[in-house]
Every structure is written in structure tokens, then in C-alpha cells.
Amino acid sequence: DRDGSPLGASTTHLYDILPWESVGTATMQTKSGLPLVLGSIYCVSVRWINNARRVSQATSDSVMADDTVPVVGYVHDGPGSGPTTDIDYQSDGVTIRAHWGLWFDPESLVEYYAWCISTTLPSSMPGYSGNPAGVCDVRGLTNIGNVTSISHTFASGVLQHDREYYVTLVAVNRATIRSWKNTDGVVVDLTPP
């Protein structure tokens, strides 16, 4: 039978969170209410003991404790690379662009970003039920990896003259916790002055 699964903060401090505990022949175990410290790395060890009392032991890969959302930086409409570069109008009738920076997660890093384009300023995070009409209605929420700018070119006629478009950026950390922010919008202006 299996003689338990200790939980420790490092391989040199095994058993400092949870001592050995028998789980019988179970192949999965969950423990809640443990005194985990954000940013600390933990691993689980499993010990098997057969009827002859011979022991084998294995230790998992490490995992970092993280229950915080990624810290939100800036996200702006248009091409650019800095926190002050933002556009409110564009004459391009086929491409929406956005750039962002200063997003981070102190515990587990930002794993990836996702974005979408809307005709309504979202008041709730994309990807969850209960979103208002118009959220991500132009381009759905799409994983874009770990980049700091993005653009999407539509077929002619998709983007409408005198219509405002919003980009929503979602940051997802390695614990799959999300934070998000919208641009202030860009108006497509296809007519000359």
C-alpha cells in the first residue's frame, strides 16, 4: 500500500508543510487549508510500501504558490511601443492594432495574453458567461502568446466608418489566473476633412 504524500517547500526541507500521511491505495489526494506562502515553491513526495515493507519514493516537479492576478499595465490603440503612444482616430479601414506594456506577475509570470475586439466597451472579462452584447463581437478572444503588440486585418467593409472599436487585453499567469483591461477605443474615420 501507499504510505502517504508529504508536502514540502523544497527538496531539502521535505515534510515541513505536511508530514507523511497514509492515503491507502488512492492514486490522487487533495489537501486544502495548508499554510502555503505566495511565491514559495512546493513539491509532493509519495512513498510506496509493499507487503514485504520495501519502500520506494518519488518526488513531483515543483509548483509555485500563486493566487494573485497579474498586475495590469497599459494597453493602447494603434501601433507603438510606449505608455504614452495612443490613437483615438484612424483612417485605416481594415486593420485594428494595439500595443501594451508593464504587465507582470511577481509569482508565476504572465504565461500568455489573449485579445479581442469589440464595438461595446466591455464591463466584464471576456471568456466568462454573462458578458454584455457587443463584447468580442468583431474578433473573438484569441490566445496570442507572450507578445507586446498585435494587429488584425479584416476584409474590406468589416470595420465601419465613424464606429468606435475597443481592444480588450487579458493576461493569464501560470496559475491560470486572469486580469484584463480595455483600450479607450479608436474611431475609424474613412472620410477626408
Image (cartoon, rainbow, N blue to C red):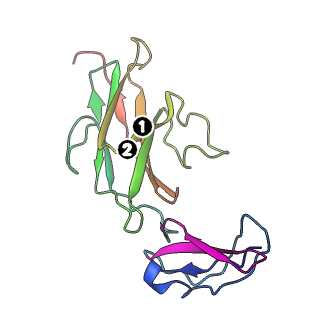
Mark earlier in primary sequence (1, 2): 1
Give residue 133's position: percent from left, percent from top: 61, 35
Secondary structure, mark 1, is strand
- Decide whether residue 62 is among the magenta residues: yes
How many marks can you see? 2
Q: Is residue 166 above or below residue 33?
A: above
The residue that mark 2 highlights is 183
Residue 179 x, y percent position in the rendering = 47, 56
Return the residue nearer the eye: 115 or 39: 39
Residue type of the residue flagged with mark 2: Thr
Say if 27 sits above or below 143 in the image: below
Q: Can the viewer see residue 98? A: no
Q: Residues within 10 Å of mark 1 (few under 14, many from 20)?
A: many
Q: Which residues are magenta?
A: 40-63
Pointer 1 with pointer 2, Cβ within 8 A:
yes
Q: Is residue 118 left or right of residue 80?
A: right
Q: Position of residue 173 (x, y in %)?
A: 45, 57
Q: CA distance from mark 1 to mark 2?
A: 6 Å
Q: Disc 1 marks which amino acid?
A: Tyr
Res 97 visible: yes
Q: Name which residue lies at 58% across and 79% down.
A: 7
Asked whether, in this view, residue 83 is left or right of residue 115, the answer is left
Q: Which residue corresponds to the image point at 23% horizontal and 51% vertical from the top-left?
A: 83
Q: Which mark is residue 166?
A: 1
Quarter-of-image position of residue 186? top left
**Number of the label disc, if any, that sits on residue 147:** none
User: In the picture, residue 52 is in which quadrant?
Assistant: bottom right
